[in-house]
Image: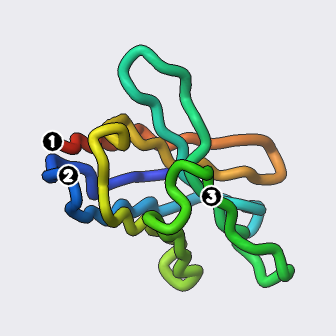
């Protein structure tokens, strides 16, 4: 599974951005897709995830982004999105797309989100 992330950029605090992640390759092997982020000097942390299928599983969010970020998927386009609203300076990080699939984990190249205060 290969992942291509896009949509990062510079935004003022309180603003919004939407990230996209397109998957290719063994699409049918994907179980869950999601986003992680890594701020300068910190470890990579979970942000949000969404199951690929309609198994009844729901999306999951880190407490720090609940109510501000929304993850969604478009299976027809093999793409997930992360709508980020009410951005804060502490959301500044490189955001990585992730896919959990039958053969393990795949990561995208990362996209930088910078929130100016």
User: Pointer 3: what residue?
Assistant: 61
User: Pointer 2: what residue?
Assistant: 13
Q: Is residue 2 visible?
A: no
Q: Position of residue 58 (x, y in %)?
A: 75, 74
State which tag comes first along the sequence, 2 or 1: 2
Q: Secondary structure at mark 2?
A: loop
- The reply, left or right, for residue 75 in relation to residue 89 is right
Mark in front: 2 vs 3: 2
Q: Secondary structure at mark 1?
A: strand
Please give the name of the residue rendered at 62% of the width and 58% of the height, measured from the top-left corner.
61
Q: CA distance from mark 2 to mark 3?
A: 20 Å
Q: Secondary structure at mark 3?
A: strand
Above or below 10: residue 94: above
Q: Residue 81 falls in which quadrant of the image?
A: bottom left
Q: CA distance from mark 2 to mark 1?
A: 6 Å
Q: Position of residue 87 (x, y in %)?
A: 30, 55
State which tag comes first along the sequence, 2 or 3: 2
User: Pointer 1: what residue?
Assistant: 116
Above or below 78: residue 20: above
- The reply, left or right, for residue 89 in relation to residue 65 is left
Answer few, some or many: residues within 10 Å of disc 2's Cα (few below 14, many 20 plus, some between 14 and 19). some
Residues at discs 2 and 1 in contact (Cβ within 8 Å): yes
Above or below 108: residue 25: below
Q: Position of residue 23 (x, y in %)?
A: 53, 61
Q: Position of residue 21 (x, y in %)?
A: 44, 60
Residue positioned most to the top: 41
Residue closer to the observer: 18 or 33: 18
């Amino acid at each position: 599974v290969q992942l291509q992330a896009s949509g990062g950029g510079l935004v003022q605090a309180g603003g919004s951005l939407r990230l996209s992640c397109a998957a290719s390759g063994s699409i049918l092997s994907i179980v869950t897709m999601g986003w992680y982020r890594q701020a300068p000097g910190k470890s990579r942390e979970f942000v949000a995830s969404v199951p690929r299928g309609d198994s009844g599983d729901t999306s999951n969010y880190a407490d720090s982004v609940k109510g501000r970020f929304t993850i969604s998927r478009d299976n027809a386009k093999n793409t997930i999105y992360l709508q980020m609203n009410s951005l804060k300076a502490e959301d500044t990080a490189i955001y990585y797309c992730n896919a959990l699939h039958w053969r393990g984990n795949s990561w995208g190249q990362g996209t930088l989100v910078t929130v100016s205060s």
